[in-house]
Image (spheres, coloured by chain):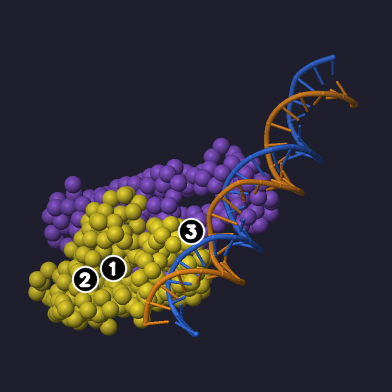
Chain colours: A purple, B yellow, C orange, D blue
Amino acid sequence: MANLSTTADDILTCARALIVAGGYNGFSYADIAEVVGIRKASIHHHFPSKVDLVRTLVARYREDTKAALADLALQVSDPLEQLRRYVGYWEACIADATAPFCVCALLASQLPVLPGEIALEVRAHFRALSDWLATAMESGARTGEIRLTSPPHVEADAFMATVHGAMLSARAYGDPKIFGVVIGAHMERMIAPPSRNAKKERREHLS
Amino acid sequence: MANLSTTADDILTCARALIVAGGYNGFSYADIAEVVGIRKASIHHHFPSKVDLVRTLVARYREDTKAALADLALQVSDPLEQLRRYVGYWEACIADATAPFCVCALLASQLPVLPGEIALEVRAHFRALSDWLATAMESGARTGEIRLTSPPHVEADAFMATVHGAMLSARAYGDPKIFGVVIGAHMERMIAPPSRNAKKERREHLS
DNA sequence: GACGCTCTACCTACTAGAAGGTAGTCACTA
DNA sequence: TAGTGACTACCTTCTAGTAGGTAGAGCGTC
């Protein structure tokens, strides 16, 4: 945060795109230098080491995500609509290929070879996202809009897993549409029918 | 296939473990040489290039998976039990950390930076797995054991996405149990209750 | 307002080591 | 005796990172 220069921003943006494409070992300072239009050594001026660069990048990504999710919860009161907006964001990103993958999801897949400090940041993102989703699940169950067949935090982890898996499938198939199809199926299963025993279900599945 | 020597096998086994840990760019010939106990140049004797090595590895992984899934369908007639065995396999792998990730899932995450020939193999794995799952889904729906809320191939893709996402979460959280919990929740939602209108549901959701 | 000081952003030029890969050699075995 | 599987000894290219320097902006002060 705290007003970094435009060049540093450019470096981070570029690095993020490169990580999303090929992970931590899938890019080099030379790659960034070429895209941003400066020399390798100049990147070291802004970020002394690769670990610094990626740690900063992930920390900022986490902050941005945290702020965006908090804002979403504030702007949209309906929990089901919150989830729809969340997946809608990714659907758009994948469709126009701006950022067709969550940078933390990609880094998590390489967790065993990641420098410790970066691994910690990645872990924290998973926990924060899962918590936000669990809160939405719980609210939805309370209003009777969402039907939970498991405790909220389990439903949240299942939802997150489906989102990440669907990103992967979209990439594997080379077809952005698959993301929406898979998530759509998951959400449909979650939407509570206007059933008579909604109260009973709610009682059963809230912690 | 076709009886490769033990050393070649060792190289492939080692490479697979290294890819599972850190992806295509996360390992080098030097890493393999150290583990297998031969020199870098000797690896080139068995696999002239890194692309050869990984292509062979993925092709063999696909063959093995194909054979195992065909065998599973032969040994176990009950479709729901087939799915349980499939996820049980991964649950065991993740729990004892032998191969806590599908090598194709990991490579798929880096698809944009993968050599073309390897990308093709990875894509083929996703298609084959999805097809197998869809067949199981369809059979399960026919016997009334599985409740499908979407067409079989969509349910199959959703299932596959959940499996891959759950692997990722298990890795991110550093907790093998999360895989079973997430998949368990998904399977529970799929199990049809002994309902009166099972026939009607079946009619609705088969292509 | 010219002088010097410091800081920022970038540069050229370099390094050590790791990467994938090659050439040629040797010993064992079918 | 041809083939296999390993070796040593290289090569080239790429990697992250360093050393040292330059141009210019900002700022105090004589």
Q: Are marks 2 and 1 on the same chain?
A: yes
Q: Which mark is residue B83?
A: 2
Going from N to C along the chain, the mark reached first, 3 or 1, is: 3
Question: Which of pointers 2 and 1 lies earlier in the amino acid sequence?
Answer: 2
Inter-mark Cα distance, 3 to 1: 37 Å
Q: What's the residue at 24%, 53% (across, down)?
A: B177
Residues marked 2 and 1 touching at CB (< 8 Å) = yes
* Residue that label 1 marks: B159
Cα gap from disc 2 to disc 1, whole angstroms: 10 Å
* SS at badge 2: helix
Q: Which residue is mark 3?
A: B30
Chain to which mark 3 belongs: B
Quarter the N terminus of chain A occupies: top right
Q: Locate residue A26, reporting x and y percent.
A: 52, 59
Q: Nearer the viewer, residue A53 or A83?
A: A53
Q: Residue at x 30, y 47 (%)?
A: A135
- Residue at 65% from the left image edge and 53% from the top image edge: A33
Residue at x 20%, y 69% (from the top left corner): B85
Q: Tell me the crowding category of disc 3: few under 14, some 14 to 19, or many 20 or more residues within 10 angstroms, Cα based.
A: some
- What's the amino acid at mark 2? Leu
Label 1 crowd (10 A; few <14 / some 14-19 / many >=20): many
| Residue C8 placement, left or right of A135 | right
Instruction: Give the amino acid at mark 1.
Output: Phe
Q: How many numbered circles does the render carry?
A: 3
Circles 3 and 1, Cβ within 8 Å, touching? The answer is no
Residue B122 left/right relative to B116:
left
